[in-house]
Amino acid sequence: MAAMSEDDRDTVGVLGATGYVGHAAVTELRERGYAVTPAAGSEHDEFPSIDVRDRTAVRSFVDDVDALVNAAGLVGIDACDENPDAALEINGFGAATVAWACARADVPLVSLSTVATIGASDPETGPITAATDREPATTYGRTKLLGERAVRTVTDGRVPSITYSVTNVYGRHEPGATSGNSVLDFFLERAADGEPLPVHRPGTQEFDFVHVRDVAAAIARAVESITTERHEPTAWSYVLGRGRTYSVLEVAGLVADGYRRVTGSPLGIELRDPPSSDDPITDRFEVDPEPLRAALGVDPTRDVEDWIETELRRRLEEGSTIEEGGRTDRHGESTSDEMV
Ligand SMILES: NC(=O)c1ccc[n+]([C@@H]2O[C@H](COP(=O)([O-])OP(=O)(O)OC[C@H]3O[C@@H](n4cnc5c(N)ncnc54)[C@H](OP(=O)(O)O)[C@@H]3O)[C@@H](O)[C@H]2O)c1
């Protein structure tokens, strides 16, 4: 492991630091006093670029840090379907390359995955935990599962690692920052523009939402744990979510109610036919936050309903930037079309 920096702060490398989650993690880690070395995936003015497919570059990056956060990925169902080879190389092999470099340099690793690795869950088996059977239904889920398993295989017995399978991330880590691609963010932006909220029938599909600041705090807590408490070379895995699900219709109702409270005017909800009946639909998707709370004291507390009103007020003041026809799939799990 690299020597401690001169002022005795641990140096944390963050891959994918230009991303939605990675950027929030950099901010949070700095707020907690870490020296952070961020890296982008592609050319950026702000950060150097470290491609997780480049084993030599990853190794030399890892050699200079005390702990590593891998927030790099090809993220989203559409993005991975459009480029499955890149998804395999970045989410699967890239995660393995990063874990291998960490094990080789004895650098503890915090790695990000997704509940898309689980696929359609069986409600009879109870809320989802890291031990739930994985049956991913998408290229995104399959390649992330490959990465998750590689991290476990490579690090277990060699170096401490913590992997989070995260639910649907929403919100902004600070005003003006990039927002998520969750259906919640999508409805919020529609509402900020005074546009009706489109819901694909039947609207019963459920999501667990976790605020991006809670995700960043959980990452920082994992870094703290593997650098100061958990020195045994074990691979730990947890599901990171709020433990509360909302159906799409419920989310639309909450946003429309928030809009009425803030503006005094009603906001319509439009039920539409789904674009394809072949899409896998999981009605129930409940996660169990207790194992993570018990192990690390991580407790995502931000509340969707409080956030809707506060954020709506803020966005109405700022002016909204929604694009006609929905959002792009630049940041996040899914486009609005997939989610709604
Ligand atoms: N957003 C969510 O709702 C959500 C939910 C569950 C799990 N997650 C997980 O959280 C992690 C981060 O997701 P995100 O939403 O922050 O994604 P994002 O906004 O799309 O950011 C992805 C990051 O990965 C970088 N990257 C892409 N290809 C790379 C490569 N070949 N080598 C190195 N870096 C590369 C990107 O760099 P450039 O910008 O420079 O190209 C960017 O910094 C992923 O593991 C994702 O599976 C996210």
Image (cartoon, rainbow, N blue to C red):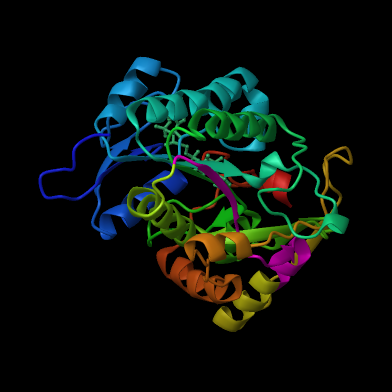
- Residue 245 within the segment the image draws in magenta: yes
Q: Nearer the viewer, residue 193 or 153?
A: 153
Query: Picture coordinates of residue 132 (x, y %)?
Result: 74, 48
**In the image, which residues are magenta?**
233-253
The residue positioned 72% from the left and 55% from the top of the image is 128
Q: Which residue is drawn at 61% across and 60% down?
A: 291
Nearer-the-camera pick, 107 or 165: 107
Q: Is residue 308 at all visible to an observer of this figure?
A: yes
Q: In this view, does 320 lie to the left or right of 59?
A: right
Residue 153 magenta-highlighted = no
The picture places residue 255, in percent across and down from the top left corner, at 64, 70
Q: Relative to residue 70, is residue 28 drawn left or right? A: left
Residue at 63% in and 29% down: 146
- State the image coordinates of residue 125 (x, y, percent, origin top left): 83, 55
Q: Is residue 71 above or below residue 285?
A: above
Q: Give left or right: position of 33 versus 29.
A: left
Quarter of the image with the N terminus is: top left
Q: Position of residue 226 (x, y in %)?
A: 39, 49
Please tell me which residue lies in front, 187 or 65. 65
